[in-house]
Image (tube, rainbow, N blue to C red):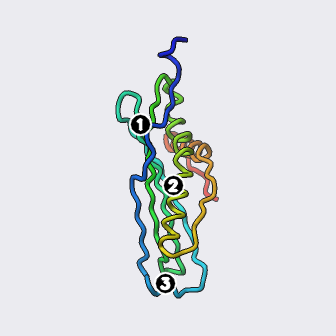
Amino acid sequence: MSEQENPVFQIEKLYVKDLSVEVPNAPQIYLEREAPAVNIQLQTNAQGLGDGVFEVALTVTVTAKIGEKTVFLVEVGQGGIFRILNVPEENLEPLLSIACPNILFPYAREVVSDAVTRAGFAPVVLQPVNFEALYMARLEQEQQAATGTDVPVQ
């Protein structure tokens, strides 16, 4: 295999693409003693920038509530630019959906923790995420939607 045909996977740039912190019920919310319920949502998005260069964005949304009152809302968009060359087409989507978010996640976790702390609350430490399982579940949902079979609800 020649030098030009070797697979290439490089990180070109990692950056915070978006950061939002909201504490809509301040200052009264700081007097609450009850622990909030924390909800975490993840979303990934990939787009080609041309010539084997891709931007992948991992968006993490953390919402903390006590009852119906929002304690805080933090949304972080962690971006990365990746160079991916000489990779078989069938391997490209898994790289963009699994490998790239795995690289971005620790950076997003740090930004979330720092933002929550700076907002005056105890840090939220995000647990590790299995992006491969999320990718496989998404493929299964897409396959079932294409065949018209229902996904069992538990």
The amino acid type found where label 1 is placed reads Phe
Callout 1 secondary element? strand
- Of mark 1 and mark 2, the one earlier in the sequence is 1
Are circles 3 and 1 on residues that touch, CB within 8 Å? no
* 79 versus 90 height, above or below: below
In the image shown, does 27 or 136 lie closer to the viewer? 27
The answer to whether residue 7 of the structure is visible from this angle is: yes
Q: Residues within 10 Å of mark 3 (few under 14, many from 20)?
A: some
Q: Residue at x 48, y 61 (%)?
A: 61
The answer for how far apart the CA atoms under marks 3 and 2 are is 25 Å
Which percent across, then down, holds residue 54?
41, 36
| Residue holding disc 3 | 29
Q: Is residue 10 above or below residue 140?
A: above
Residue at image location 43% in from the left, 49% down from the top:
15
Q: Quickly name the residue at label 2.
A: 108
Could you say where residue 35 lies in the image, as x and y percent from the top left? 60, 79
**Mark 1 and mark 2: Cα distance apart in space:** 18 Å
Q: Is residue 124 left or right of residue 60?
A: right
- Outermost residue, left side: 50
Q: Residue 7: x and y, percent?
A: 52, 23
The reply, left or right, for residue 19 in relation to residue 109 is: left
The residue singled out by tag 1 in the image is 54
In-front residue for pair 87/120: 120
Q: State the separation of the CA atoms marked 3 and 1.
A: 41 Å
Amino acid carrying label 3: it is Ile
